[in-house]
Image (cartoon, helix red, strand yellow):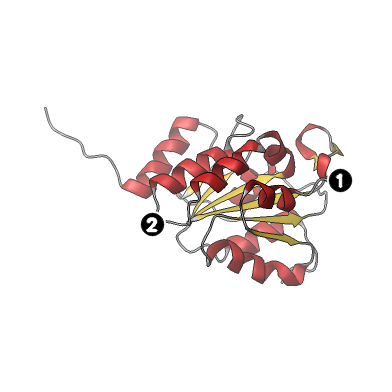
Amino acid sequence: MIDSLERRPLVAEVLGERGDALVVAGLGSPTWDLFAAGDRPENLYTWGGMGLALPTALGLALAVPERRVLCITGDGEIMMGIGSLAVVANQAPENLAILVLDNESFGETGQQRGLTAGPTDIAAIAAGAGISATMTVRAGNQVADLAQFLFAAVGPRLAVAKIALTEEPWALPEKDGATIARRFREAIMGAPRTTDR
């Protein structure tokens, strides 16, 4: 168990329970933390596409309903695309889980005070959008319950982890989008067949 909600250990501990889940990471820290927890072909990393992690995970969950899909994103990114929560609620994929890493700051642009440092509550917004299964985690002794919440129960579901504002060493995965997408697609569907001409 981790002693406090430090971002990278939290992500690593949660992902230790992922099984064969597909994971879509948001821009910046979620991508670096996913890679630091262990590179796998079933990891879909994001570069330069803020706001796209949850819509991508939703599309994936609908396309591959037999696999659990986890979206790991930050508070700034989820607030940027808050309407995506209503789309998730309306589509209601049972295999989709969302983990929002909330440091209450805009960490990627200078650590300015974020929207959730005030009265804004992402879990309450998600519930208002129609995602009835929500959870907010503030202590290390809740991480096992968090992993169970994300991977073992019917979705859609959203968890907010209130994390410390920390500086972690960069752990940078592959940056080429075509390579990332091809590897991810092959992990799900297998390598494309080639034909001799």
Front residue of 11 and 128: 128
At 77% from the left and 58% from the top, the residue drawn is 6
At 45% from the left and 60% from the top, the residue drawn is 20
Front residue of 113 and 80: 80
Front residue of 186 and 116: 116
At 63% from the left and 37% from the top, the residue drawn is 83
Residue furthest to the top in view is 197
Left or right of residue 194, residue 58 in this image = right
Tag 1, which secondary structure? Answer: helix
Q: Position of residue 125 (x, y in %)?
A: 72, 47
Q: Earlier in the sequence, mark 1 or mark 2?
A: 2
| Displayed quadrant of residue 29 | top right
Hey, what amino acid is under mark 1? Ala
Q: Position of residue 184 (x, y in %)?
A: 43, 43
Which residue is denoted by mark 2 in the rendering? 66
Which residue is denoted by mark 1 in the rendering? 117
